[in-house]
Image (cartoon, rainbow, N blue to C red):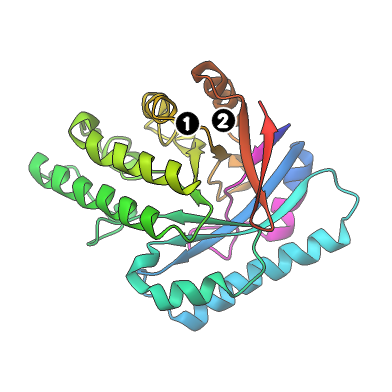
Amino acid sequence: MLIDCHNHSLYSFDGQEKVADLCKNAVKLGLSVFALTDHCDMIDGIAPDALISHITGSVNELTAWRESHRDTSCRMLIGIELGDPLENLPLADEMLKLCPYDVIIGSIHTDGVTDYYFGDYSQTPEQELNESLVRYFNRLCEMAEWGQFDVLAHITYPLRYIIGDYGREINLDRFQPLIDKLFYTIIRKGIVLEVNTSGLRQKINATLPDEELLRRYYGLGGRLVTIGSDAHRLRDMAYGVEETEEMLRRIGFNEVVWFERREMRKMPL
């Protein structure tokens, strides 16, 4: 009973795969639940008309595939990854109403200056890195307080690049008060924490967040988790999901969460 609730098609700026090919592969992999969650970023300079076109294309193609394959055992979910929504709340609200989503992922990719994906951190002074991460975690807390989404994605996203790609050492202890604030907020609001497996196939070699932070979340009373590969290519779909389920059981979690028509569903581990 495997779930993968975070995937991207060619309707994302960094995706390459056709929607139909992703759906076929989800069935081939034996997934019970698959969610297509193409990017909808509020700060990347894409014109609103282009965002609308990308998301409606993604949703319409998945809907068509789902309608023509009603006999599949895999639930094909319509989703969206809403990036940095507080940067343009009117547009974010418009995108939230655009389609009948099953699941809405909320994510932050920037410290307010640049997306970490595009950064070069080889020579960045330590103080500058720390200040950037303070801004990042504050932005996560602000988005969580806004709360108009179902799942909080990859909360240690910057480390994928700062640590993984550039080998910089980051001690998260200095950010623990902010991370605890974030955890308390999503627990209070019933927002689900995503365990993003992308780091397991990347240089950082850890889920986002990692086991230590997941133990902290569990210790504070957090029980709602979902799993997403953040795949942009067929070969990455469901990568690390079984390993992640094993880690979650080790921590004490006994179920994972997914959404259908914005309603929470639970699956035992």
Q: Mark 1 sits on what residue? A: 200
Whether residue 248 is visible here, answered yes or no, is: yes
Vertically, is 218 above or below 85? above
What is the residue that sits farthest to the front in this orientation? 188
The C terminus lies in quadrant: top right
SS class, disc 2: loop
The N terminus lies in quadrant: top right
Residues tagged 2 and 1 counted as in contact (Cβ below 8 A): yes
Q: Dot 1: few (<14), some (14–19), or many (≥20) neighbours within 10 Å?
A: some
Q: Mark 2 sits on what residue? A: 240
Residue type at the position of mark 1: Leu
Q: Dot 2: few (<14), some (14–19), or many (≥20) neighbours within 10 Å?
A: many
Name the chief secondary structure element in magenta.
loop
Find the distance from the CA under tag 2 to the CA under tag 1: 6 Å
Vertically, is 26 above or below 216? below
Whole-percent x, y for residue 147 in the image? 44, 57
